[in-house]
Amino acid sequence: MEERLHIVLGAGQIGPRVAQRLLAAGHHVRIVRQSPREDFTHPSLTWVHGDLRDGDFAARALEGAAVVYDCMNPRYDRWRTELLPIASGALHGAERAGAKLVALDCLYMYGRVDGPMREDTPMRPCSVKGELRRSLAELRLGADVDVAIGRASDFIGPGLDQAVFSERMFERILARKTAECTGDPSMPHAYTYVDDVARGLVDLGTSDATGVWHLPTNPARPTEVWVAELGAALGIEARAKRVPSYVLRGVGLFMPVLRELVEMAYQWEMPFEVDDGAFVARFGWGATPNASIVEATAAWARERFGVKAPAIAAPRPL
């Protein structure tokens, strides 16, 4: 039987998780990343390093692919110059290889939505980054290859560095400081568990599914509830507070990536809800329960920061 090569683009928060799932399922995997670093090894894994904005490199790097997983996501302050060019390189390489493209996406292209976002919700972005995501979605859906787009909300889970629930957030609450949020932490907000993101993308890649899909995501609830439950699981009392936009703008003079957060604060100014019903109906599984997400994330934090488990078991999350 002919071996099918699965190529993962990007080795940040999601790419390695996708690769590891594919390897565990017995697939041959190639990871393409820009920096010359290889984070783990496996007999069925190869690494390729280079810039996918170079069309010739993209064609070589994706040669032989059956499925390409675009998990790339530049830093916020580089979206204007890098987001569309690197995604176009991935698309070019997939077209040259005749491969299916599975792309990780967010929800920014919908803009302000009254009620749960669905796959057929009109794209009416209210931010520069949302406009970029709309252009990217249109580019991908107009490609001459099979394309499946998996959309997720803000990530939650272990080992994140570009998320609300980042290592920095855990450093703050473990230092008995308040967790910071760019919007109202009391507003219901949907978060997508990173392991569900990776599992969902693999399902899209190993099936005949095409088009747009919302990856499994639990019902929205306040960020401050997540913070309190994670704190309790770590044996501390943790709270969340909103960082005013003027503070982000001021600090953004020295750290541009923080300035880019200001226009996205609208997501915490109204309930931010996701309808994942189409994916659940098609693939037969839903989001990991909140309690399991808290347990897994707290376990990671205890190991990462050398924190002992609470002497008394924390109450189970709702």
Image (cartoon, rainbow, N blue to C red):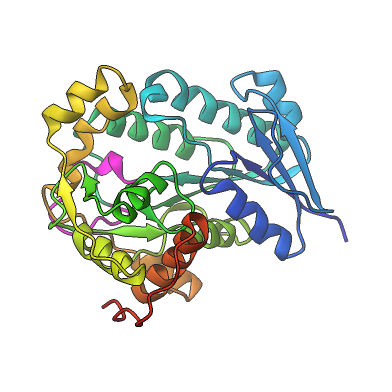
Indicate whether 308 appears above or below 185.
below
Q: In the rendered image, which quarter is residue 12 located in?
A: top right
Q: Residue at x 35, y 64 (%)?
A: 217
Q: Residue furthest right?
A: 1
Query: Residue 308: within the magenta?
Result: no
Q: Residue at x 86, y 56 (%)?
A: 2
**Callout count:** 0
Q: Nearer the viewer, residue 251 or 45?
A: 251
Residue 112 visible: no
Indicate whether 248 appears above or below 13.
above
Indicate whether 272 appears above or below 108.
below
Q: In the rendered image, which quarter is residue 216 located in?
A: bottom left
User: Residue 261, image x and y in percent?
Assistant: 25, 33
In the image, the segment drawn in magenta is 106-120
User: Residue 135, image x and y in percent?
Assistant: 37, 30
Which image quarter is the N terminus in? Answer: bottom right
User: Residue 189, image x and y in percent?
Assistant: 22, 57
Q: Residue at x 20, y 54 (%)?
A: 272
User: Residue 36, image x and y in percent?
Assistant: 70, 29
Residue 70 located left or right of residue 139: right
Query: Residue 108: within the magenta?
Result: yes
Residue 265 visible: yes
Q: Main secondary structure of the magenta part?
A: loop
Q: Nearer the viewer, residue 157 or 89?
A: 157
Residue 127 located left or right of residue 28: left
Residue 271 located left or right of residue 39: left
Q: Residue at x 68, y 25 (%)?
A: 50
Which image quarter is the C terminus in? Answer: bottom left
